[in-house]
Structures are given as structure tokens and as C-alpha cells.
Image (cartoon, rainbow, N blue to C red):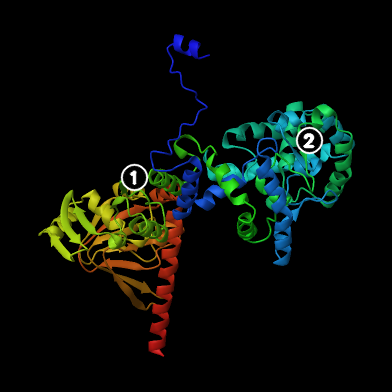
Amino acid sequence: MYDEIKMSGNIPYDPSAEWIDYVGPGFESREDMQKELMRLLEVVGLDRDIYRIGLLRRISPEERPNLVQSVLDVRPRLKEILAERQLSDLVEPYDFDKYNDNAPVGVNILFGTPSRTEFKRMDFLSHPYIQKSLRESGLYEKMIKMGRETLDLMIELFTGLPPGHEFFDRYSFVSADEMPEVKNILKRTDGVRVDDMRKEDQLRLLDVAMQLTPARHRLRVIDDDFRELVLQARPKFRENMPDDLAGYIDFFEADGYASAAPILDNLLFGRFAYGRANSEERVGEVLFEIAHEGGLYEGLVSLGLESQVGVGGSRMSQTLRQKIALVRALIKNPDLLVVDEGLSALDRETRESIINYLTGESDHTSLVWVDDDDHAGEKFDTLLYMSNGKLVKRKSVADDSETTTEETEDEAAAALAAGDIDQEVRLLRTIPLFAGLDPSVVKLLAFTSPRLTFKHGEVLVKQGDPGDAAFIVISGRGEIWLTTDEHQTLKLRDVHAKEVIGEIALLVDAPRSATIRAVEDMTVLKLDKTEFLGLVRQDQAVSNQLIRVLAQRLDQTTKQLTNRNNDKN
């Protein structure tokens, strides 16, 4: 083999050899490095994320016998604790004599799941035995009808949504690209007897029906008569199944492991109850607790670390990508670590926890931390403040000294007044609504928002006018006035720099609820509603933060009006 490699001019290295250098970073063995990796995952708050990824993996007893045995050992313990804590109703267990409303129709019919990709979906449904069994059990025509009713509803609900909209992945049985063909199927099968339908149309409708989960989809196409037919057909499916098909299906057994199902399903031996609030989180906490008892936790984390996450981590959130990048750097035991806004997607509490670790326990590593958050510098020996590409202040914690460059505030104010986008970004990141967003998103927001100036006395928004934008105050001062139904004019409050005003218009199509007037010359960024909705689609954190700000603003306004009424009385 190696002679052939040399003759062909290739490098004679074994691709299956150990390629990880654990000695370089100072570890004595691969096991030592693995222990440190587990510790670092916990430090950055990544351990549970990797653990959850492992829970959703599929494994076989042949490849990982020890992990499979751990799952089987934990299963009765999980059931026992859920019963003790009165949480059993959060999981609907698999029972051969009962229909599981939290599992798809296909899983209920087979009481198992296909273990080979070639027997999933259309190929599985077209198998002669499956076709024959569905017809003899009286399920075939009912499932065709169920599938057609479901597709008809999908067309009604999702027509008009743009391609790639998240609702297609989360709620629909079809993609945006398939919508035209689905409409054609519905036209071809309208009023047509099942046996007169095209074979491919029958398979497509059966496929949709196989995916229906009553508790999740709540479409009312599955009734008690259908459930009873499934339970009657279930033993016949298994008893008479030909060998060429039986070998490709993992049947559920109370003391067995179904390799075609995720590890989580095997642990539960059932499905989460969709109708119970926070069932996944509450059961997940119990499972996380007992997973540490028998070594299952470490096995799941190791399995999660082996999972494919797409090119450049495309299947992961930005938060996970940033945590992984930090762990990748820390596991090398670097002498110098530079973090340049590398954890911007994390919440402040998590960032502070990581900073505490890096500045406290990690004595051998010198740390350079770049951040727009002033609080991040509290744990560091030396602080350097930059503005407009210049060093403007140096602060040493050791000798409590501080050096400041003159004209800093004037230069910053001048740059902001001149429309410097970097200054606008810094300003936006001090506003609660945008503080937790990725810097690139904030910069895009500043770039796409028109910069407007209002002179003293001019009205930014007028009560009753249509609302199509919010305003981010850069400088100046304004006042918010409300005209009541009794035609009284009330001043609600002053408006200052670093505030967002008129933000209700971003969420609802309603007239302006108050008038905002400039009492000093004001400079603002206009955040257009259309641009904002596009931003929300990019980053869900924007809408979550906006809801918090609106709730706080509503509470503040309510208290002001209440105090005014009390003063009058």
C-alpha cells in the first residue's frame, strides 16, 4: 500500500492515525486532555448544549454497547423519579395496547420506526406489504382523506409566505418550493375515488398522513375510530411482516433499544406531552440530574462533540459558535489570548462569568479583551480606551493611575455630529434595545437608518397620525404630550439622547399614541418599520428586547398617569 502511495507522489501518512497533539498543550495523555475539555465546556456554559446534541443522536448497540447499556439502565430510574415528583404526565409512554397521541401516525401503526433510509417515506409506503396491510385494515382510504385535508389546510395557511420562511420548517408538511405541486395534487384528486388517483398522488397523501401527530398538529383529522383501527392493525403488521421488511424496522420493546430512534426517545420510551407546559424543560432537568449518576452524561457529551455541525458551524447558533471558538483556544493552553468582541452574542451574565474565570483561575495566560461594555474591564489590570482609532485614556488598576488625552469628548461629539457611523454604533450599543445585539447587526442598523434633524418646536410625530417608524435620539431634547379623550393636554415626560421613541409603530399598525415635539434642536436616526422587520427576521433577540422595552415604557406611562390622577384627587 505504502509503495503505491510513494509511487503516486502522495504523502505516506495514515489518515486514521492519531492526529491530535495533546503533548504540545501540556497534557500527558488524550484522557487528560478530554477531562480538561469537559471542564472548559462547563466554564463557558457549553456543556449542556453539547449534551443536548448528544441526546438527539442515533446510535447502534453494535457500535456503542456501553452507551446503549447506560441508556437502558437510566430508563427505569427516569420513570421512577418522574412518578415520585408527579411529573409522569409530561411524558406519554409507548404502550402496545394504546394509541400515543404525541407520536406520528406512522410510529403508532408500526409501534417502531424504520431503521434504513431506503425504507423511509415514499419507498416504505410503496412496499407491497405496507400497501396490502393498510387496505385490509381499513386505514388506506382514511389516511388518503386525512392527507388531502391536511394539504388543503397547508395551502390555506402558508400561501403568501416568502420562500425560506421559518414557518415552513416548523409547522408545514411541505416546503415553499413544493406549494405549486401540492396545489396540482389537490386539483387532480378533487372528487376522485382513491383507486382512480395517480399512484404518486396516493403515496404523497399517505406520507402526509403518516407524519400527523394529534397532540401537536390539532387538525382534528384523527378521531377515535381511526385510533381503534390502528390498534387493531398493529399486532397484524408485526406478526405477518415478511423477513425482507422486518429486518429494517426497529420495534419498540420495554427492555430493548431502538437504534433508529434518537437516544432521547429511548430514554423516555415515549414522547413529550405537547399539551403540557414546559414538558421538555421540566423532564430535561430530571434527566440531566440522573444522567450524571451512571456515566451517561460523559458519554452523551462525547457523542455530541462528534456531531456534524455544517460548514463553518452553519447548523449552530452564533452563541454556540462563539463558545466553541473560545474553548478551541483555551484547550491549547495559550500564553496569550486575544478576545476581540468574540463573545458579543452571549448575555452579560455569561460573559462576566467567563471573564472571572480567565482573569482569576487562568494565571498562566495573558489576556487581551476588546469590548464596548465598560463593565467588562473591571477585572483587568490595565484598561485602554479607544475612540476614532486613537488611544484616549489609559487606566492602571495596580497603581490606581489614569491618563486621559484632552479634547476626547469634543472630538467624539464632533464625530457624532458629523455623522460618523462608528460613533453612531457606539451610541446605539449603549441603548438597552440594541445593547445585546451582534456588532455587525448594530452597524447595519446605523448604516440603513436615515439621519434627520428637527429644529426647536418642530414635531417628530403627531398623535393620531399613522406610525411607520421609530426614532433613535442622538442629541437634543424633546417632550412627549398626550391629548386625552376629554381634550386635556398632558406632558408625559422628556425625551433625551440615547432613547428610542415611537417604537410601538414597529409592532402594530395603529395611529401614534402621543405627540413628540423638539424643545431643543434634535438629531435622530429614523428606524423604518420595513427595515426593522427585516432586522427581526435576522435576529430574534431584537424583537425580544423590544418587547421588554415596550413593557417597561407601558409600566412607566401607567404610573405617571396614575400619579397625575391621584394628585388631582
Tell me how far mark 1 sits from mark 2, CA to CA.
71 Å
State the residue lying farthest toward the front.
28
Residue 235 image position (x, y, % from top left)? 88, 42
Circle 1 — which element? loop
Q: Which amino acid does label 2 sit on?
A: Gly
Q: In this view, does 391 lie to the left or right of 474?
A: left
- Which residue lies under the disc numbered 2? 191
The quadrant of the rendering that contains the C terminus is bottom left
* Numbered circle sitting on residue 397: none
* Residue shown at 56% from the left, 47% from the top: 301
> Relative to the observer, which residue lies in front, 120 or 56?
56
> Relative to the observer, which residue lies in front, 519 or 371?
371
Q: In this view, does 54 lie to the left or right of 85?
A: left
Above or below, 210 against 277 in this view is above
> Relative to the observer, which residue lies in front, 2 or 431?
2
Q: Are marks 1 and 2 in contact (CB under 8 Å)?
A: no
State the residue lying farthest toward the left.
406
Above or below, 217 against 208 in this view is below
Q: In this view, does 374 lie to the left or right of 149?
A: left
- Which residue lies under the disc numbered 1? 334
Q: What residue type is labelled 1?
A: Pro
